[in-house]
């Protein structure tokens, strides 16, 4: 019997991390968890209010439509126009998603199968490779250039001939790297020449600092001929538990995703879409508060690292620091030493692919005082190793 693709996928590194964390907690240890990038909230009050109101709405009793709810479509369309100057036709170029992780997986499953290749940055959000494998397709990893862009020249000709999708993620998790619109235009041109679907994961569109404004691939003229982009409420509005996102761009890809999804489920929960509509309608007022919270945490972490003689550049986007494991120290030895010593949970770089070895990620998802305590712990353990 041919094995199911699931049987060939290695265990999720986060499962291993969860098991180690649970074992420590079972021993009564108090931990500071800066491992997973799960926002600590609170959700904006307008979103909470929308959730309360929608609970009493009779329309929620029925199944949601396959396409976006009109209120969500309108709020998202206006957001795209105001934030990026991008006009879209919501009937053809937009779908609501129950999270961008799910949406990216569904896009890959709808577009790829055995024999196909998906081009993925060499350090990546895990669903890119795992959904590719679930589709029976082959993930091929594209190295980063020094400036954080992708080394497209490194892709072999025979691989390119089989490639269906090129994935990009700027600002990137876990790398925090961001790129300019000019760089995005290079990917659009590449996708056009090689007949690829360009899939841009823009989960961190709003989390940027020091005057840097994150561009959308759809700002590149003609991008919607080849590109789709996923956006989410999870990070910008601390709504990861609501599961609301959207995908926008190339009409044929959207229609294919719609066809795929209609075979396996319904539209995205009306409750989630109306909460998402409230968030996008108020984005201009809400985003600065979120950004200010993360910027302040980022500055606290950067200062604490520098005090500990740990040379870092503060990231200009995302909610992460992507740091080096001390030279010569095994990744899991490092992770365990942090958990067992100061009780700090971090994510080993290998959770994001083999090229992440020798790195680890911390997430800015704790209050400043705890982040400072966590970094002091990191610094102390590092001193013991180097
Ligand atoms: C790069 C990236 N894409 C997508 C997601 C998932 O977002 P969502 O909550 O919309 O599924 C994350 C979550 O950490 C992420 O880091």
Image (cartoon, grey):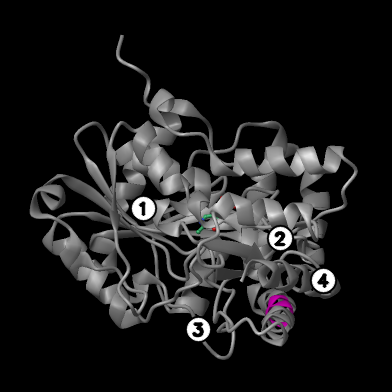
**Residue 267: % across, % down:** 54, 38
Which of the two labelled residues, at mark 1 and mark 3, occupies the earlier sequence position? 1
Q: Which mark is in front, 3 or 4? A: 4
CA–CA distance in space, label 2 to label 4: 11 Å
Q: Residue at x 18, y 63 (%)?
A: 154
Q: In which quarter of the image is the N terminus?
A: top left
Q: From mark 2 to mark 3, how far is it between C-alphas?
A: 26 Å
What segment carries the magenta color?
294-298
Which residue appears at 47% of the width and 48% of the height? Answer: 126
Task: Check disc 1 and report the residue beneath it.
Answer: 92
Q: How far apart are marks 1 and 3 (CA)?
A: 27 Å
Q: Is mark 1 on a helix, strand or loop?
A: helix
**Is residue 24 toward the left or the right of residue 107 in the image?**
right
| Cβ atoms at labels 4 and 1 below 8 Å apart | no
In which quarter of the view is residue 85 placed?
A: bottom left
> Counting other residues with Cα less than 10 Å from the Cα at mark 4, is it few (<14), some (14-19), or many (20 or more)?
some
Main SS of the magenta part reads helix
Is residue 221 in view?
no
Query: Is 210 positioned to the left or the right of 271 in the image?
Result: left
Relative to 362, 249 lies left or right: left
Q: What element carries label 4?
A: helix
Relative to 177, 271 lies left or right: right
Q: Residue 373 — which label? A: 4
């Amino acid at each position: 019997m041919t094995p199911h693709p699931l049987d060939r996928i290695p265990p999720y590194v986060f499962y291993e991390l969860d098991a180690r964390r649970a074992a420590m907690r079972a021993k009564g240890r108090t931990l500071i968890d800066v491992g997973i990038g799960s926002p600590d909230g609170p959700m904006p009050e307008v979103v909470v209010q929308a959730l309360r109101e929608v609970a009493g709405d009779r329309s929620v009793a029925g199944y949601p439509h396959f396409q976006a709810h009109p209120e969500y479509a309108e709020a998202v369309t206006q957001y795209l126009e105001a934030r990026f100057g991008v006009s879209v036709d919501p009937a053809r170029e937009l779908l609501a998603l129950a999270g961008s992780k799910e949406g990216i997986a569904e896009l890959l499953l709808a577009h790829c199968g055995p024999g196909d290749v998906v081009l993925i940055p060499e350090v990546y959000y895990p669903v890119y490779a795992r959904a590719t494998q679930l589709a029976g397709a082959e993930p091929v990893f594209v190295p980063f250039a020094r400036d954080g862009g992708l080394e497209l020249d490194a892709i072999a000709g025979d691989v390119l001939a089989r490639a269906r999708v090129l994935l990009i993620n700027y600002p990137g998790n876990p790398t925090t790297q961001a790129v300019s619109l000019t760089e995005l235009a290079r990917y659009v041109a590449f996708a056009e020449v090689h007949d690829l679907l360009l899939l841009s994961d823009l989960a961190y569109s709003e989390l940027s600092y020091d005057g840097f404004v994150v561009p959308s691939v759809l700002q590149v003229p003609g991008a919607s001929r080849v590109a789709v982009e996923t956006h989410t409420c999870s990070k910008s509005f601390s709504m990861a538990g609501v599961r609301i996102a959207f995908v926008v761009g190339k009409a044929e890809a959207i229609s294919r995703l719609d066809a795929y999804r209609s075979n396996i489920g319904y539209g995205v929960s009306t409750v989630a879409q109306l909460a998402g509509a409230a968030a996008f309608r108020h984005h201009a007022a809400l985003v600065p508060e979120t950004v200010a919270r993360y910027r302040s945490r980022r500055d606290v972490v950067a200062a604490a690292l520098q005090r500990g003689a740990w040379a870092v550049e503060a990231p200009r986007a995302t909610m992460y620091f992507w740091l080096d494991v001390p030279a010569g120290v095994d990744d899991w030895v490092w992770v365990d030493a942090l958990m067992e010593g100061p009780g700090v949970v971090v994510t080993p770089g290998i959770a994001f692919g083999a090229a992440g070895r020798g790195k680890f990620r911390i997430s800015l998802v704790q209050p400043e005082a705890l982040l400072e305590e966590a970094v002091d712990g990191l610094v102390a353990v590092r001193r013991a190793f180097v």
